[in-house]
Image (cartoon, rainbow, N blue to C red):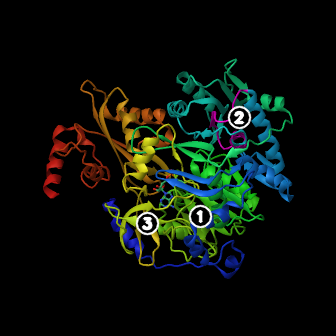
Amino acid sequence: MADDRTGSIDTLLHEERRYSPSQEFKAAARWNSPAIYERAQRDPDGFWAEMAKELDWFEPWNKVLDWDVPKAQWFVGGKLNASYNCLDRHVKTWRKNKAAIIWEGEPGDERILTYQDLHREVNRCAATLQRFGVHQGDRVAIYLGMIPELVIAMLACARIGAPHTVVFGGFSPDALSDRIQDSEVKLVITADGAWRRGNIVPLKENVDRALKTCPSVRTVLVVNRVMNATRVPMDEGRDHWWHREMDHSGGTCVEPAVLDSEHPLYILYTSGTTGKPKGLMHTTGGYLVGTQMTSATVLDIKDTDTYWCTADIGWVTGHSYIVYGPLSLGATSVMYEGAPDHPDKDRFWAIIEKYKINVLYTAPTAIRAFMRWGSEFPLRHDLSSLRLLGTVGEPINPEAWVWYRKHIGGDRVPVVDTWWQTETGMMMIAPLPGITELKPGSATFPLPGIEADIVDDRGNSIPLGGGGYLVLKRPWPAMARTIWGDPDRWKRQYWDRFPGIYFTGDGAKRDKEGYYWILGRVDDVLNIAGHRIGTMELESALVSHDSVAEAAVIGIPHEIKGQAIAAFVTLRADETRPHKELIEELKKHVTERIGAIARPDKIFITAELPKTRSAKIMRRLLRDIAEGHILGDTTTLADPNVIQSIKLQYEERE
Ligand code: WT7
């Protein structure tokens, strides 16, 4: 267990502040009676069937859930199409000319796509994909910045039943190539570049490098985003400009494929406890049911709202709560391309004021950065349009929660802290803002229809007031169905530790009133600024450097990012370069192998790694060194005696 962190959680459990919804909020909220929890518990299948009726099905299902651990099927026999649910059904109503996407580029350019616009573009893109031989079941990789074409491409894939795999634009060529190879992608959609803090991210160049090791890819479509700011080489025969091909498609309509409820919608890679990222596969029916329901009830998005989720679509938050949830609901979803501090630290607040945003969904790490920058930046803008705030991605400390409510929410709006994962596809533990009394720092309760628990090592439920492993005891509609190409890992990783029960990898506590307080990961996965990264992945990136013999990576607390990366490495015998130079080179190397999110904050070069007699690395000792509890900021660890002598002291203490 994350025993070294339970101390701070105990103080959280004494949090006395409470926030109840205002009468006004309650009266307007989609769900405002606690009876919904009992309704779902009494008859979960019936409850989910009711939720599923909010979608348009070409053919009804004949069974809500077919559960044979660890294989779930939801709405068995039902037929539908995600793109139809996000577009066609709205185009037939008054929403036809409603904004589906309000997009703002980092340089300040703007595009608004109505449901009708989006429908047209998605059809043109679907026709383009078909022309390049993409068939139902083929995989398409999308490696783009936050531009509308990303949503268009996703929905076009969904329209023809070609699962997409979106790769975050911050990932390196190696990381991109691993993902393309793993899912045997046929076509890649990218751009000439992406704007980030006024600089160009060379997406196409990265694709060119990645594709050297990806024989399955036959076509690359290139969106012209950064215009003439950069010139990218085009490989004749393989590379095609997106705009030319879209023009070529003209006004073609592509009938949405009639897909099985369990047809794969997408694969999304995330870090696990091994060196190899896993491709979580999500399917169509259940996923849409779960994301639409939570968009409507937790984020409480209404037809009159302008809603903004600040996540990148490269992560699951963007998939579920920029694209599929809000659009299936017919909402207006805002998308912003760039950095929160470009050109100044008030960019988010300027966007909120400009579009009169009503619902904002962001990450604790961003909130902590805003706190650090100071309240003068939000004060420059009128944020009175906001009526609900949400957070996701990592535990939010009560100070940040209260700051967010006060300085962004004007001390009047609910803040919903939503716990979920790439694997769960949808929010799982979160308040219902018209019902739940909020406690800052707590994700509150499992949503209706969700059965969570906190258990000990042997899987026994821990009474209220205690902590342990967070598990989920009943399948839920948006759950991932498997790990792409590795069903054994799906079973081993999630369903074997507590047989038949889903193990989240998180630790949590429950207070006397049953509120959940999430502690964070209890496995070898770090959460850096809300992004998941495996210690093994980092370690293998480090040892892939010629100078490194062994590496051990740990997470250490960080004021803004939540966790930071500290790496301990031992060098090959023939390595003689100055350590300072080498440390910089290793940081760069990891960035190149994985991406900037994986850049280690601290690297310690040591003569050896402290191991127990059974050869397990003593991570607690490393943590104490990295946090400066033992040596302060010195890095004299390369002296062979240093680690050895601290290790002895440690063994005596244990
Ligand atoms: C891990 C999942 C869900 C989308 C973004 C992250 C941590 C997520 C919370 C929260 C405390 C949280 C957990 C979880 N996490 N939300 N509200 N409170 N921790 O998705 O990359 O799959 O990471 O993020 O540790 O297991 P992900």
Q: Position of residue 73 (x, y in %)?
A: 57, 51
Ligand 1 contact, mark 1 (Cβ < 8 Å): no
- Structural distance between the alpha carbons of marks 1 and 2: 49 Å
In this picture, residue 266 sits left or right of residue 653: right
Residue shown at the point (55%, 27%) measured from the top left: 210
Magenta run includes residue 133: yes
Amino acid tagged 3 = Asp
Amino acid tagged 2 = Val
Residue shown at the point (34%, 59%) measured from the top left: 2
- Residue where numbered disc 3 is placed: 453
**For residue 137, what is the image quadrant?**
top right
Q: Quadrant of the C terminus?
A: bottom left
Residue closer to the observer: 151 or 600: 151
Mark 1 or 2, nearer chain start: 1
Q: Which element carries disc 3, helix, strand or loop?
A: strand
Magenta highlight range: 132-157
- Structural distance between the alpha carbons of marks 1 and 3: 19 Å
Residue 226's tag is 2
Residue 560's tag is none
Residue closer to the observer: 589 or 83: 83
Q: Position of residue 449 (x, y in %)?
A: 56, 66
